[in-house]
Amino acid sequence: MLNTFLGHQWKSFFRSRGKGTNIAVQIVMGLLILYLLVCALAVGFFMDKILHQVYPDRNVTEVFNGMILYYFALEFLSRMQLQELPTIAIVPYLHLRIAKRKLVNFLNVRALFSAFNIIPVFVFFPFIIFNIFPTYGTFAGIMYLISVLSLAFFNNYLALYVKRLSISSARFVIIGFSVLIALALLEYFKVFSIAAVSNWVFSQVAHQPVIAFVFPLLAFAIFNINARYLRNNLYMEELSAGEGKKTSTDYPFLDRFGDAGTLAALEIKLILRNKRSKSTVSKGLLFIFYGFLLYNKKYLETNDFNMMLFAAIFMTGNMVLLYGQFMFGWQSAEFDGMLANKVSIRNFFRAKLLLFNLSSTVLTLIVSLYGFISWKILVIQFAAYLYSMGIAPILVMYFATYSYKAIDLKKGSSFNWQGVGATSMLMSLPIFLAPYLFFLPFSLNGKPFWGLAALGVAGLICFLTRNFWIGVLVKAFNNRKYKIAEGFREK
Amino acid sequence: MIVEIKNLKKIYADRTVVNIPELQINEGETIGLVGNNGAGKTTLFRMLLDLIRPNEGGIFSKEQNVSTTDDWKNYTASFLDENFLIDYLTPEEYFIFIGSLHNMSRNDVEQYLQRYLEFFNGEILDSGKYIRDFSKGNQNKIGIAAALMQNPELLILDEPFANLDPTTQIRLKTLVKGLRTTHKVTTIISSHDLNHVTDVCERIILLEKGVVIKDIQTTENTLKELETYFSE
């Protein structure tokens, strides 16, 4: 029976619609996963050297022990965001003569097919085999292996269980990351340390390997809790989101923008009430931490703004890019209705622009906190902001008129390539490159601030003349609207 | 004359799915469009609403080609399928949105909805659900009510009786008949239910493979005539 189920899954994957056109994407995904696994393997084999490089004055095994729980804490959060719940697949079997137990087993086995469950093997096993076995003996080594595997399984089923309890995982991930950052800070200020806890736990395991049986027990416990929960809730409606009473809402703030405001309010509801849009936007919010990676002292002192401009554009305009690239795709389900109703396309574009501008403004206000690092960052971000207000949305919306792919709003956004076509992939390139058209001519001549000013002025001009650009967009749209509508009808 | 079809042709992969050299629809007429699956009913509706582009000819609403201006949207209301509904809204939000497109205030919409409480049978309003969580029949009701609310001169409904419960089917028939007498609304509906369509419509257009086979005024013999045609 289990084999039949897995066979069906296999077919559903290979016969899924749009697979033919997305085959290149599948290959890219496959290569990406392969690449990740190779990286994991490399990290695993060179673990002792890497650890020695990073912490030359500390005992390698100690650092390794300290790392294990950290890894699994991070992995848990990633699983929450990336791992899919394999539930919808069983709906067609519910009414058939198949014992519930078997369905639950299938769901649980199916959940093991995830790259997340292989990576820890690659990362940790080599070090354990080459370093722990010789130092602490075979028994301790085996218990290490069992512990790591058990932790992976524990995470696997805990993540699924938590996800089943609270389908809206985006909020959870943000809270989780905040907790992790807080822990990292506590560790940094030497108040409390996961690493110390982890190190303590695993040094106990090293000396008293029997203790490690706790981990498989924990994994088994969460497996059982998960299985029992599934068995008790194996009903169509309970497998999906918890149903609360839905109420009508208003955004009076948007009323002042007239018809475009009404449409923008509609779109905000779209974002908040659908899974795919919600996770896209919440993921975009995580990018405001990009600055920590790319803003750095050396660049600031030498006025080398190239990388920082990239970060600023990405942070102030990420909603425009991530959300905007699908443009009409978000409305694909009701697109016919939009066209047949008395909605003017001009207002439709104006509403999108309004939303983009609101998001860029809010994001810019948030990332202004980077200004504490240096005033130069504020200047860069302001130029990027004007670009994200005036030029980026127009470019995004123009390219979007070439995208004919519908989007299913009920699916999550992680590794979800539905609606992603060659155009939307290529589209991000000009949007990142365009600012440098204005910036580079000046910065290459040693006047980076003039470059920023040029970018800002260009953005401002486009913003002020937006009605003209919307006219251009409407024309482009009208040329292709039948094709877009047709594309959206085939889901 | 409100709608005029001239030399209309739609071709998909070398197959002509709609081919209507000439057809005129007068103000205040209630027209029933019948035909088996694949006769071209929905394709015709979509062209009438400028959702797909004809390969040849065009459809003229009040003498203006629907694909070149948007003026027809001011007096045309339609409901073809669920793709016309915004499924993440509550019914109330949807009605208010559609109302706002026709400059109806929230109060206007609420007042209007009062008249349709019977039609809704207590299932639509204050239900605490998004449109996507309703059954197909109830989604149909929402779409039809939203179309009627726009106070159109031209009303287009694709298989409005499908998925509706018997009580609502009868109520819908009364509603459509009422529109003709009170508001002079031109109505075009398609249906597979010959009983309903001959009961409601004054004029029946029978399509087959995209071609108009019959175009008749309804009499007491029409139902028989259609039944004989389809049983052959």
Image (cartoon, grey):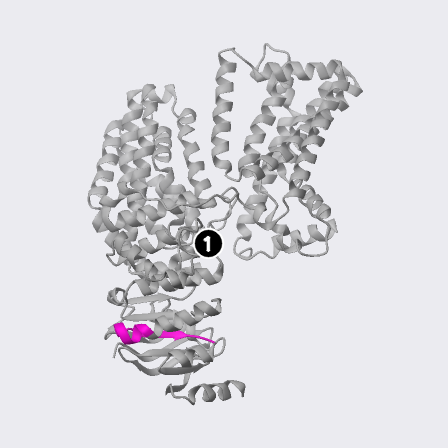
Q: Whole-percent x and y of residue A301?
A: 33, 19
Q: Residue furthest right?
A: A138
Q: Whole-percent x and y of residue B198?
A: 41, 81
On whether residue B187 falls in the magenta region, the answer is: yes
Question: Above or below — where is A163 with respect to B196?
Answer: above
Query: What's the residue type where badge 1 is placed?
Result: Arg
- Helix, strand or loop at disc 1? helix
Q: Quadrant of the N terminus of chain B?
A: bottom left
Residue at image position (27%, 65%) is B151
Q: How many marks?
A: 1
Q: Is residue A226 visible?
A: yes
Q: Image check: A185 left or right of B154?
A: right
Question: Above or below — where is B165 with respect to A224?
Answer: below
Residue at image position (26%, 75%) is B184
Toward the viewer: A406 or A174?
Answer: A174
Q: Whole-percent x and y of residue A125?
A: 70, 27
The crowding category of the residue bearing disc 1, from other C-alpha atoms within 10 Å (few below 14, some 14 to 19, many at least 20), is some
Q: Whole-percent x and y of residue B74?
A: 25, 64
Q: Quadrant of residue A224?
A: top right
On whether residue A78 falls in the magenta region, the answer is: no
Q: Chain of mark 1?
A: B
Question: Above or below — where is B114 with respect to A50?
Answer: below
Q: Quadrant of the C terminus of chain B?
A: bottom right
Q: Quadrant of residue A485?
A: bottom left
Toward the viewer: A400 or B226?
Answer: B226
Residue at image position (42%, 83%) is B206
Circle 1 sits on which residue?
B132
Q: Image check: A319 left or right of A205?
A: left
Residue range in magenta is B178-192
Toward the viewer: A169 or A485?
Answer: A169
